[in-house]
Amino acid sequence: MYQLLFQSPLGPLTLSGTEEAVTALSFGALPGAGDGACPLLEEAARELDAYFQGRRRTFAVPLAPAGTPFQQRVWAELREIPFGATASYGEIAARIGNPRACRAVGMANHRNPIAILIPCHRVVGRSGSLVGYAGGLDIKRALLELEGAAQRRPDLPRVSTISRIPDGNGLMPGTAVFPAALTPGSKSVKMNGIKT
């Protein structure tokens, strides 16, 4: 098992995995993170860096989250929620063919081991309210704002923790700037000594 510490605009993230797939993305620096990485985790970090810079909407690295068959179905459906969109727990339950399983979907969402890459941050309450997130609601809000979900879904609460970049800056329209409180210091990101 390899681990890589990635300094994101949201703070440190720990990527874990094998040479074949990412198995976890955790908020914070886990003990031993950064001691050894592999090319696949370095590629995942580059994809995350591009995502945070507004240059990537999907992730291509292979994922291998450990979970029950039900959790796997939920996580696969989460990956179908497009960048900039949200879905409710009830909508996910209906999509996997079990419309009464809203709470079970919520528990599977809570147990998602690969945050951001499996976009559980795109799941909201039935009324559009922000509910639970492993990284905290401020991070969930920041991710949804980065993706422009607040503009596409008027019932989603407005996010005031980040500023908008005016169009015409060479970035994807709707790209967000994270405030100094969330920014690790420099525009470039270091991952295990590799500067992107």
Image (cartoon, rainbow, N blue to C red):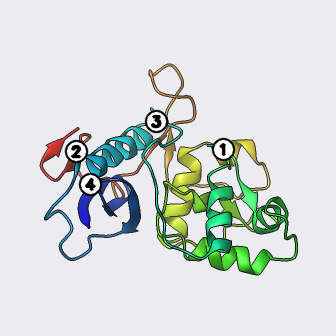
Q: CA distance from mark 3 to mark 1?
A: 15 Å
Q: Earlier in the sequence, mark 3 or mark 1?
A: 3
Q: CA distance from mark 3 to mark 4?
A: 17 Å
Query: Dot 2 corresponds to which residue?
Result: 186
The tag on residue 82 is 1
Q: Earlier in the sequence, mark 2 or mark 3?
A: 3
Check disc 4 and report its element: helix, strand or loop: loop
Mark 4 and mark 2 in contact (Cβ < 8 Å)? yes
Res 192 seen here:
yes
Give the number of the mark in front: 2 or 3: 3
Q: CA distance from mark 4 to mark 1?
A: 27 Å
The kind of residue on which mark 1 rests is Pro
Query: Dot 3 corresponds to which residue?
Result: 54
- Please give the name of the residue rendered at 61% of the width and 67% of the height, measured from the top-left corner: 72
Check disc 3 and report its element: helix, strand or loop: loop
Judge the density around disc 2: few (<14), some (14-19), many (≥20) Cα neighbours within 10 Å.
few
Give the number of the mark in front: 2 or 1: 1
The kind of residue on which mark 4 rests is Pro
